[in-house]
Amino acid sequence: MIFKGQTVNVTMGEHGIAHFTFDAPGSVNKFDQQTIQDCKDATKAINEDSSIKAVLFRSAKSAFIVGADITEFLETFKQDEDILVDWVKSSSDMFDGIEDIKVPTLTAISGFALGGGFELCLATDFRVVDETAQVGLPENNLGLIPGFGGTVRLPRVIGPDNALEWITSARPKKPKDALKMGAVDAFTSNDKIIDVATSMLQQAIEGKLDWQARRAQKLAPIQFSPTELENAVTVAKTMVMAKAGKHYPAPVAAVDSVYESAGMSRDDAVRVENRYFAKLAKTDAATAMIGNFMNDQYVKGLAKKAGKVNTHEIKQAAVLGAGIMGGGIAYQSASKGTPIVMKDIAQGALDQGMAEASKILNKKLKKGRIDGVKLATTLNNIQPSLSNESLKSADFIIEAVVENPNVKASVLAEVEGLVEDNAIITSNTSTISINRLAKSLKRPENFCGMHFFNPVPLMQLVEVIRGENTSDATIAATVAYATKMGKTAIVVNDCAGFFVNRVLFPYFAGFSLLLNDGAHFAQVDKVMEREFGWPMGPAMLLDVVGIDTADHCTDVMADAFPTRMKKLENDPISVLYGSKMFGQKNGKGFYEHSKDKRGRPQKQIKDETLSLLGDVAAMDKEFDKADIIDRLMIPMINETIRCLEEGIVASPSEADMALLYGIGFPPFRGGVFRYVDTVGLANFVAKADKYKDLGEIYHVTDKTRQMAEAGQTFYGTYTGK
């Protein structure tokens, strides 16, 4: 044994090749401060042992290194920027030390080698991957750039143009792509990777592979002409601004770091990277996006706990109601391995449901994401049926018929009489009370809500709604099934609109009030998209949701919260609905929707729409961007806070992830609670008070005011994460 640490050990193998093995306690290897220190100590031991002729870096686990332990770094990021520069330099020095080992080095990569894991691979002279490998630098997804030499070494290995695409896109690369670009040197099977790695190191020892030249290339300035470098940077910045926009500083910083350090030696270039990393670590975007990662891990942890206690095996599922929604649910279940019956009373709806599943699969086939076998297997897992007999063997039911409480209650009662007593029945309702629907059932303990978002294959969130009689076993089984379907399940308690729709409709109410006061819906959309960062503004979102659906939901919310969410007499949404302008579903809403020659969706503003809305939305005033944002966001924030105070949602983490995954809350803002904590609760209360005369949706709760006066934050006050 040459070295043994808590996370790393170094042993002597054959031919004078030392095996530097990562084997941290737990299921995965990741870079924390202990691992960094172990690596420093192990490198020192290697350099002091003259019998070592080469070093093979490998993992004792199925994955190499999944990245840095970001949870350990969060407190560090609160330090001043100068302290952060010194901290990241101390860590990156370890990677430089590995690159400077006196003998040839090679990494054998199986499974994930991401972030700091791949940065270590780049520090070695050679890299070999097997078919399980995925490599990349995903730090942009956390609002950061690689901090351990990734922006320095990767451009010197594969060129700045390719490197900038890798870094700014933050997408892992598969083995063949990595090999094609020169990021790795060999591709082999998992059972042969150590043999191939050993053979390559033997060749390096014998001088047949020029490891010194490889290393010298990474230590020197980038070998690109000034013109080539300028072109690469221009292309990268253009792509970054088109995809990420101004709210995400990390991709631009990555480009700037590469450009600024291109003419420097490694040591000076890494110092440039250190500075950019430290600066980004202090941004609100990084705080929010790291928070998103932590929240996602927390929510996944809750799902894992549900999976462990779940005792309900689902051999056969069923969805009641076909069409686009039913077809999407059926596809999702079937594609993840759970056979499902798709039941409807109309053959046309079944045909539409199967067509929806086929469309999704054929798109994936065309893009090379699945093969013909997967397509056929998935379709075979879907059984379209007009007969109730097909439901008798189902042990999990998803009711997805028309959004009418009486129809749903009738269907639920009927299916309960067909299935076994222990079968779980759920309703894919977006607004109707689970407690109300449960009254039609004899076994309400086996019933809960399971609210999918449309389009099902693309939307990650599933709201699992607990009724007053729902058992813990039913919740656990539903969360486990949603997780198996590839979704993120958030458990909420029953109320009108549940969580996501309940907080969305005050946002729409704020929008309608703003139009009443003379704002132009197109200006509002532009501000909420470009300035706040929503994927689409409220007018476009209403067109996508459906004006008819929105009008119906507004009635539901008004019945439940008659003082706070009463329906406006002059609501522009009602005006459009009364004129049968339902949005995208019939081509006319706030915008007129059509497709261009290439089949891409496009929208236009028609004079007749402006005329129709003229009596309730004059659209003759310009509003300050900040006013537009506040008038829409304050109602949503207030309602989200009420849901937390009432226990509808259990924690800020779950609330924020539901909004990110359910309605596309801007990731760089991190969800409502992260956003308010960033703005400052006292500042938020002052803003809300400014608009208090507009109605109850702008009134903060007493507890919110108390928290503001006490200088508290939501993430610091509430339990959970």
Image (cartoon, rainbow, N blue to C red):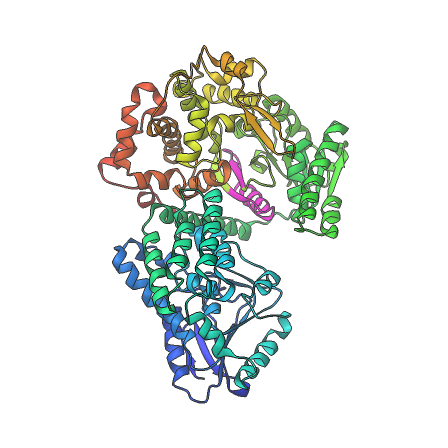
Residue 288 falls left or right of residue 470: left
Q: Residue at x 45, y 42 (%)?
A: 657
Residue 384 image offset from top left, x and y in percent: 75, 36
Q: Position of residue 568 (x, y in %)?
A: 43, 15
Q: Is residue 477 magenta?
A: yes
Image coords of residue 617 (percent x, y): 44, 15
> Is residue 179 covered in magenta?
no
In magenta, the rendered stretch is 461-489
Looking at the image, which is closer to me, 242 or 309?
Answer: 242
In the displayed structure image, the side of residue 258 where residue 399 appears, left or right? right
Where residue 197 sits, quadrant-wise, is bottom right
Q: Residue visible at 52% across and 79% down?
A: 210
Q: Nearer the viewer, residue 495 or 177?
A: 177
Q: Residue furthest bottom?
A: 51
Most extreme residue toward the left is 709
In-image side of 450 versus 291 (left or right) = right
Vertical comparison of 311 with 182: above or below: above
Which of the two residues, 173 or 165, is positioned nearer the viewer here? 165
Q: Is residue 520 visible?
A: yes
